[in-house]
Image (tube, grey):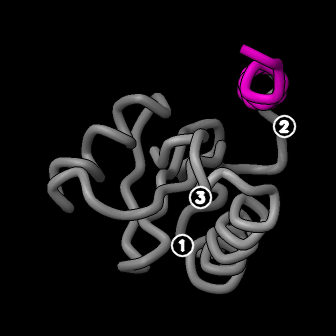
Amino acid sequence: MQSTSGPMATQEYRDELVAKGLDFYNNKLRDLLEPVHNSEYVVIHVDAEDYAVAKSLAAATRAMRRRHEADGRLIGLKIGREPEFGLAARLIAAEQAAAMPK
């Protein structure tokens, strides 16, 4: 996934990435993936509007990176209506760590 440091790590950039990924999921993927793949993970290549589904976020990410030769902006989501609390906690922790002075 995209680095969270440097000029591309702005909150505005992250918000745009998430909005584009969620828009693609909600408008093109949700009906295809739910409920058949509930509790699995989808990684969306935002720039190519491509996706990969797997049992884990890591496996879906690897599949997408192989397909697109590690290029592009990715967003990962748990499929279904049940929230992924562990993923949310890791994202919050990473954001807090990035904000800490070095």
Image spot of residue 26 (x, y percent): 71, 76
Residue at horizontal 63 percent and vertical 48 percent from the top? 77
Give the camera-side residue of 17 and 67: 17
Q: Residues within 10 Å of mark 2 (few under 14, many from 20)?
A: few
**Residues in magenta?**
87-102
Residue 8 belongs to magenta span: no
86 on left or right of 56: right
Element assignment for label 3: helix
Q: Amino acid at mark 1?
A: Leu
Q: Earlier in the sequence, mark 2 or mark 3?
A: 3
Seen in the picture, residue 24 relative to 91 is either above or below; the reply is: below
74 on left or right of 26: left
Say the numbered circle drawn on residue 32: 1
- Which is in the foreground here, disc 1 or disc 2? 2
User: Circle 2 is placed at which residue position?
Assistant: 83
Most frequent secondary structure within the magenta stretch: helix
The residues bearing labels 2 and 3 have C-alpha atoms spaced at a distance of 27 Å
Image spot of residue 15 (x, y percent): 79, 64
